Image (cartoon, rainbow, N blue to C red):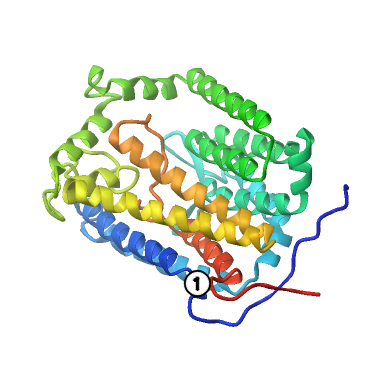
């Protein structure tokens, strides 16, 4: 049957003990707290040199955190069905912003990349916003066209078309790391939606081949891949950042050198408070801190999968795919960043969710986390969801 699947409507259950996933809340609060501490520790030296104030980046990150929490609290009051209905509009806004950031005089170019829209005292990184928009759109699409995706290859054309447009615009910035993330989110949700295994494997192979080809077409990207394999061939050039990161991991040993006592953050490791904040965590907190932080991300991913499965079991398709998409996004980006810091993956400009300095990344991650909490709220642990009759 080709009848259009109507999105389910819900009556909100009364609040009760266990109305929101406590382990999810714990993982989010712990990551935010640990991230704020480590970002502050990693940024004091560069903040004092650039701004004459060691806590400059703490103040800014704290302001971003407060703004993100207020915005997330407002989002919390919006039922999921409204996000589902607004998904096409949000996608259109996201695409227009990606186009705007490429326009001369509109987007802001930093280090050769046009990724930011300047809005007074802050700059918005559109590639962070588009990740959330894509997850919301795909969750809405799969909630309405799940049977088509499972039955025929034509059901995957719309998500792939959206992915192609977003990927092209991101590559024009250029933002290769963001392109990889949105590709993984799309393929992951297609797999969860029940796309036939043969189609999925074919898409995965094509995506991998395309990413390798794109890397080889850009000398800058390919040099990063080569330098990651053996950074010591150019220790003062392409391999410098990775070598300094590995030194930080080596100095950390079991228990670390102590909070605030990192040497690598003293202008040896570039971007110590942004993309490489995890190396400073490893140096100051050691293997114990590394395992603790990895466990927190694993806990976050596990609870997202549990929430998504529970939502799908109660026929909340939108909430289920939304939870799966957010969980996949967080864990993939986190472990790619960790892999880059440890030298097991090529260097990519991907932030560590909830830890790296950056307003756009932190605010968007908070909004995504709040949507995940909303899915948990509408599909509680204790009370069954009542459908409208």
Helix, strand or loop for disc 1: loop
Q: Nearer the viewer, residue 221 or 311?
A: 311
Can residue 47 be seen here? The reply is no
Residue 1 as seen in the image, left or right of residue 169: right
Relative height, residue 82 to residue 242 (above, below): below
Residue 137 placement (x, y as % from top left)? 67, 51
Residue 145 placement (x, y as % from top left)? 77, 48
Relative height, residue 282 to residue 66 (above, below): above
Which residue, given by chain and number where applicable, does mark 1 sit on?
A: 20
Can residue 372 be seen here? The reply is yes
Q: Nearer the viewer, residue 238 or 298?
A: 298
Residue plotted at (56% across, 32% down): 171
- Mark 1: few, some, or many residues within 10 Å (few <14, many ≥20)? many
Residue plotted at (20% across, 58% down): 54
Residue plotted at (52% across, 66% down): 373
Figure quadrant of residue 34: bottom left
């Amino acid at each position: 049957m080709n009848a259009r699947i109507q999105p389910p409507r819900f009556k909100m259950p009364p609040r009760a003990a266990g109305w929101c996933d406590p382990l999810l809340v714990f993982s989010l609060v712990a990551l935010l707290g640990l991230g704020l501490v480590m970002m502050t520790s990693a940024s004091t030296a560069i903040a004092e040199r650039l701004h004459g104030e060691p806590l400059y980046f703490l103040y800014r990150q704290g302001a971003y955190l407060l703004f993100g929490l207020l915005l997330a609290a407002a989002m919390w009051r919006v039922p999921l069905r409204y996000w589902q209905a607004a998904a096409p509009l949000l996608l259109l806004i996201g695409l227009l912003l990606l186009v705007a950031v490429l326009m001369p005089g509109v987007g802001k170019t930093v280090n050769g990349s046009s990724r930011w829209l300047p809005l007074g005292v802050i700059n918005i990184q559109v590639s962070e916003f588009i990740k959330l928009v894509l997850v919301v759109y795909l969750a809405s699409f799969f909630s309405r066209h799940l049977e088509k995706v499972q039955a025929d290859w034509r059901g995957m054309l719309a998500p792939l078309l959206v992915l192609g447009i977003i990927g092209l615009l991101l590559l024009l910035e250029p933002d290769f790391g963001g392109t990889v993330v949105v590709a993984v989110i799309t393929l992951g949700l297609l797999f969860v939606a029940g796309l036939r295994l043969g189609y999925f494997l074919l898409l995965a192979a094509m995506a991998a081949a395309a990413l390798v080809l794109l890397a080889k077409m850009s000398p800058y990207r390919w040099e990063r891949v080569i330098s990651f394999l053996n950074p010591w061939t150019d220790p003062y050039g392409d391999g410098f950042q990775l070598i300094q990161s590995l030194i930080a991991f080596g100095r950390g040993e079991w228990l670390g050198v102590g909070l605030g006592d990192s040497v690598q953050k003293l202008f040896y490791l570039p971007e110590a408070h942004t993309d490489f904040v995890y190396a400073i965590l490893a140096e100051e907190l050691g293997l114990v801190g590394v395992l603790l932080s990895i466990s927190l991300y694993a806990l976050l991913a596990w609870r997202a999968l549990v929430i998504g499965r529970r939502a799908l079991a109660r026929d909340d398709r939108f909430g289920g795919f939304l939870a799966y998409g957010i969980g996949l996004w967080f864990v993939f980006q986190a472990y790619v960043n960790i892999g880059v810091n440890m030298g097991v993956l090529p260097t990519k400009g991907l932030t560590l969710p909830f830890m790296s300095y950056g307003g756009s990344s932190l605010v968007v991650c908070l909004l995504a986390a709040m949507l995940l909490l909303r899915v948990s709220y509408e599909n509680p642990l204790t009370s069954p969801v009542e459908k409208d009759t």
